[in-house]
Image: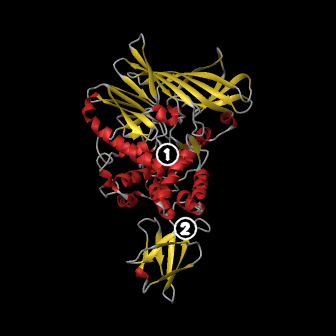
Amino acid sequence: MKYLFISAVLFFSAVQTSYAQLLHAREIFSKADSLRGTLTPLRTCYDIQYYHLDVKVDIPNKSISGTNLFRFKATTDFQKLQFDLFENLSVDKVTYHGRELPFSRAYNAVFVDFPQVIEKGRIDSFTVHYSGTPIAATRAPWDGGFDWKKDSNGKPWVATACQGLGASVWWPNKDHQSDEVDSMLISVAVPTGLMNVSNGRLIKTEQLPDNYTKYHWKVVNPINNYNVALNIGDYAHFSEIYNGEKGPLTFDYYVLQENKGKIEHLRKNARETLQAFEHWFGPYPFYEDGYKLVETAHLGMEHQSAVAYGNKYKNGYLGNDGSGTGWGLKWDFIVVHETGHEWYGNNITSRDLADMWIHESYTNYSEALFIDYHYGKRASQEYVYGNRKAIRNDRPMQGPYGVNKEGSGDMYPKGGVFHHMIRTIIDDDDKWRSILRKMNKTFYHQTVDYADIVTFLNAETGINFDSIFAQYVQHKTLPTLEVKQMPNGQIACRWMAETPNFQMPIHLGVKGQKSQQYKVGSTFTTIPLEIAKIGDLDIDTFNYYIRVSTQ
């Protein structure tokens, strides 16, 4: 948080001007955000099927130039469409069947007019030619853009990271998570002597006449825009085969030359991670494109089939364990967390950034499942409980729809705690595993929203999770379990929550005895437990993230 102090004299003389500027800034922000976040007819009129992104990176000048081919299928008759590119980058021209098309711009949106109506069902294409100096990230990956760095030998080390801010920060595309391109070719020209690593598989290397080398990477699975990445550096390449659920899976590691002696750390963590996640979630979703870890100067990102890695070959999160339990120091946080996103975020993608909690909550919980697989359920429970200290309960985990806004950062720790609680409510670990695996199969390579996830869980479990998801995802406060002791020694319980008619089962028991799950709603329910005093009641606050009020 930044603070600005000004004198009282300056404040009163500037207040009127500042207020006008503030209103103008809010108006611009609102319009730009809606253009990016809203699915208007100018965006839904076409379905992206293929991109060919072909760019040259000028490292000394920190600039890029190139083209992107949009191949699409018309979903309705139209003569005008919108694509996206940040306004600081130049759209040099838009070409269509050998002719240039007129276009206009509004903030980060570009509107293209076609010479005739594109009829519904038609497969067609146009190409955007662009250039400029993209935004440089100052704290990648938390802010987006290009990360221009050098390795310890002074050689260029460059990467992109743009989740949230948007892929259109560096390349033209239909920048909305609801429309994943079916396949893609990524061609990146870099100074000879350096290597570019992108998503998918390297199919060709081309020597250009100006002392540049172009690397062509083919992606054959659907990919969301923010996952498309380039990584440029003086890389050493190691490869191996992992025998996974669907058969042989290529593992590739691209590390700086200076770190090639540390490759065993990545190999060990990658193998252990795939073992755990294929057990819990089902087969790795991108066998055709392979699995890569690519060393970056920034901490890491879930770039599909080319996971960015910058955890400095340490266990934990840069050598730390946020849970305070010690379990987080037994594995490399970035390898595990970012690989978890291959299932939640890349395989299953939220349609709107408002539901980014789907990506981060399940992936945070995947850390606990990794621990469960390798160290046991109790260790997993302790890790989840330890992560509670990072929860702020400041805002809902879900953001507003249509304006490109995610919810609270609580989607990480609170999200993981929440899914562990769902597992506790289901109270059948074999069933829980089958649900997670079926979820990844049902929504394989698809985009989803809040309703899809809740409806799926309700159907698979026979439990109505509507009010539980509403309270934990769409509200910031915790439900309170009110408990009172009756004259006959029994107890009565009810939930107090913002969600109307909130209902959630809870495990209760007498201390020293085995607990049992009881259904509790928003009106007092008598629980058939007899206790001498309220302090003898055992409420499972270790697995349920709740508040308790006793009378």
Residue shown at 67% from the left, 36% from the top: 44
Q: Residue furthest top?
A: 209
Residue shown at 29% from the left, 35% from the top: 263
- Colouring convention used in this rendered image of the protein: secondary structure
Badge 1 or badge 2: first in the primary sequence: 1
Q: Give percent across and percent down for residue 39.
A: 65, 40
Q: Quickly name the residue at label 1.
A: 344
Give the SS element for disc 1.
loop
Q: Residues within 10 Å of mark 1 (few under 14, many from 20)?
A: many
Instruction: Give whichever of 72, 426 is nearer the camera.
Output: 426
Q: Residue furthest bottom?
A: 487
Q: Give percent across and percent down for residue 40.
A: 67, 38
Q: Which mark is residue 388?
A: none
| Left or right for 258, reference 526 | left
The quarter holding residue 420 reads: bottom left
The quarter holding residue 300 reads: top left
**Residue 394 visible in the picture:** no
Q: Give percent across and percent down for residue 162.
A: 47, 36
Q: Quickly name the residue at label 2.
A: 504
**Three-letter residue code for mark 1:** Tyr
Depicted 117 relative to depicted 175: above or below:
above
Q: Give percent across and percent down for residue 238.
A: 33, 29
